[in-house]
Amino acid sequence: MVGRGIRDDTGRKRGCCNAGLALAGRGPYHPVMRLLFLGDVMGRAGRRAVTEALPRLRTEWRLDVVVVNGENASHGMGLTPEHARLLLEAGADCVTLGDHAFDQKDMLQFIESEPRVLRPMNFAKEAPGRGHRVVTDARGRKVLVAPVLGQVFMKRCFDDPFSAVDAVLRAHPLGGAVQAALVEMHCEATSEKMAMGHFCDGRASAVVGTHTHVPTADAQVLPRGTGYLTDAGMCGDYDSVIGMDKAEPMRRFVTGMPRARFTPAAGEATLSGVLVETDDRSGQATAVTPIRQAGRLEQAGP
Ligand SMILES: [Fe+2]
Ligand SMILES: [Fe+2]
C-alpha cells in the first residue's frame, strides 16, 4: 500500500491490503464498489485478451462495473457492431470510443440502437449516439460513465471538454443521482489529462486517461477523493508502436516515406487498465490499482 489507499504496481499481493480478502468475510452488502476500466482495445490481439480474460476477472475480482475503451478494436481503426457485441458479451457494461469513434461507418447507425456504446460527449453536435450513460450494477447502484475528448495535439479541435464535463457532473452529483462517476479523458497531452483530474477532484470517483496506448505510473487518489491515472494504456501487443506492427511506423519515422498500411501487431496482448474501488456513500475513491495482465509488460493487479 502506497500513499492514500494506493497499492504498488509490482503485481505482488500485499497480504492484509488485498481487497479480495478484505471483502471475503463481509455480508451480502458492502459499501464498496469495484470498477474496472480497460484502455484502448487494439485489434484482434486486444479483442482476444479481453474476451479470454474478462469473464474470469469479473468473478475473481468481484467487479461491479466494467468499462472498456473499444476505439481501436476493429483493425486498429474504430469499432464494428460485431466487435462491440463481442466486448459487451465478454463482460463490459459500457464500451467507450474516442477520436476513432466513427472510423467504421457502421457505427454511425449502430450507436443509435446500442446505448451501452458511448462516443465522447464533445465529439460533435451532430454526432449520433450518446456521450454519457448511467450504468446500474447488480446491486442497483448507479454509475455515471462519461467519456470526453481533449483538445491539445488532437487532429481536430473538439469542443471544450471542461465545460462539457462540468455540466454532466453537475447533473449527476455523487451521493445523489449516482453512487460513482467515471470520467474518461481521451487525449494526447498528459498536462490536459492532469488538469481534468484536478478539475473533477471531489466530483468524480475517477478520472482515467486514454488514447496514448502507453500506461503511466501515476495512479493516485487526488486530495478530494478522485481516483486518477493519466493513461490506462492499451489492451494490445506491446511489441509494437502503440499497438501497430512496428515495421511500417518505424519505416515512416526513419525514412519519412510510407510504403504500406498500418496493421495491428498480432502478438500476445497485455490487458491494461485500472481498478478503482469507491465508497458508495461518498462516491470517493478509496484505492486505485494499475492493471497489467498477460503479454510482455511487467504484471500488475490486485
Ligand atoms: Fe484515440
Ligand atoms: Fe486509441
Image (tube, helix red, strand yellow):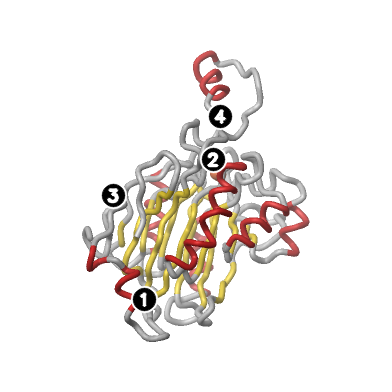
- Pointer 2 or 3: first along the chain: 3
Q: Is residue 72 left or right of residue 20?
A: right
Residue mark closest to the camera, 4 vs 2: 4
Marking on residue 279: 1
Q: Report how far apart the C-alphas of labels 4 and 1 lie in the structure.
A: 41 Å
Q: Of label 3 and label 4, which has the lower sequence position?
A: 3
Q: Determine the residue positioned at 51% across, 46% down.
A: 235
3D distance between C-alphas at marks 2 and 3: 32 Å
Q: On residue 154, which mark appears?
A: 2
Mark toward the start of the polypeptide (4 vs 2) = 2
Secondary structure under the numbered disc 4 in the rendered image? loop
Type of the residue with mark 4: Asp
Q: Earlier in the sequence, mark 3 or mark 1?
A: 3
Q: How far is the residue under mark 1 from the one under mark 2?
A: 35 Å
Three-letter residue code for mark 2 = Met
The x and y percentages for residue 1 are 23, 60
- Sequence-wise, the earlier of marks 4 and 1 is 4
The quadrant where residue 199 appears? bottom left
Q: Nearer the viewer, mark 1 or mark 2?
A: 1
How far apart in space, not on screen, are marks 4 and 2 (Cα)?
A: 22 Å
Residue name at image x 57 percent, y 42 percent: 45
Q: Nearer the viewer, residue 291 or 48?
A: 48
Image location of residue 159, percent across then percent down: 58, 52
